Image: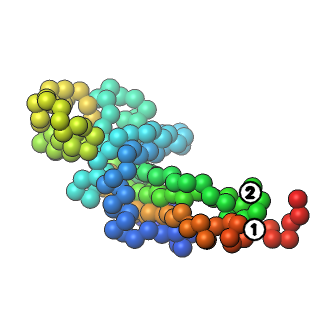
Amino acid sequence: MSNAPKVRRADKLMSEERTRDMLAQAYSGHLATVDADGWPYIVPLLYVWMNDAIWVHNTRVRGHLRNNVDNDARVCFEVDGPGEIFPYGRFECDTSVAYRSVVVFGEIRIVEDRDEKKAFFDALMKKYGDPYWDRPKGFFPRLDEVTVYTIAVERMTGKETPLPTAQERWPAIDNSKSPDAVP
């Protein structure tokens, strides 16, 4: 993926282990595709991080997502976890947010194998379902009514800004970006 964008803020990079952990634990993600006319399209989806790939599903009915996937298999997938907003300087514009995010570049494919689809739904229900629900496990009678996709990861990066301790924030430390400004 030599033409994929490079990370500008290398000082914010998460380790590969933390990046993978976040992919496994984040609640939902955003899948970005491009249509035949070059228009971007992004859709929020529940997902599973399984077998070092991202797995999602959608209706079997052809729509914008499926048309885009058929047009170009290159996709981008993002998850994030916002944290607390904090001041680092004496002006309102000297404010930031603690966060974590992962961006994945890869190629998407449609999963046709029924056993793989069942494995995805088992993992999906393990992640999002309630283990105390009294319902048949592993039974998916509408399996043919959905499309399951998997994204092969070509490159992923995780970035974060941790919440500084109170002693590292304004007013204890003034990190104003315009230190000579006077209101």
Q: Quadrant of the C terminus?
A: bottom right
Q: Name the residue under label 1.
A: 177
Marker disc for residue 1: none
Residue drawn at x 74%, y 57% is 93
Residue 136 is situated, as x and y percent measured from the top left of the image, at 10, 30
**Label 1 secondary element:** loop
Label 1, label 2: how far apart the Cα atoms are: 9 Å
In the orientation shown, which residue stands out farthest toward the right? Answer: 182
Does 50 sit above or below residue 154?
above
Circle 1 residues within 10 Å: few <14, some 14–19, many ≥20 = few
Out of 95 and 124, give the one closest to the viewer: 95
Q: Which amino acid does label 1 sit on?
A: Lys
N-terminal-most mark, 1 or 2 = 2
Residue 69 is situated, as x and y percent measured from the top left of the image, at 38, 41
Q: How is the image coloured?
A: rainbow
Residue 14 is situated, as x and y percent measured from the top left of the image, at 44, 68
Residue drawn at x 29%, y 52% is 49
Residue 151 is situated, as x and y percent measured from the top left of the image, at 32, 51
Q: Name the residue under label 2.
A: 93
**Label 2 secondary element:** loop
Residue drawn at x 43%, y 32% is 64
Does 157 sit above or below residue 146?
below
Q: Do the residues labelled 1 and 2 touch (CB within 8 Å)?
A: yes
Circle 2 residues within 10 Å: few <14, some 14–19, many ≥20 = few
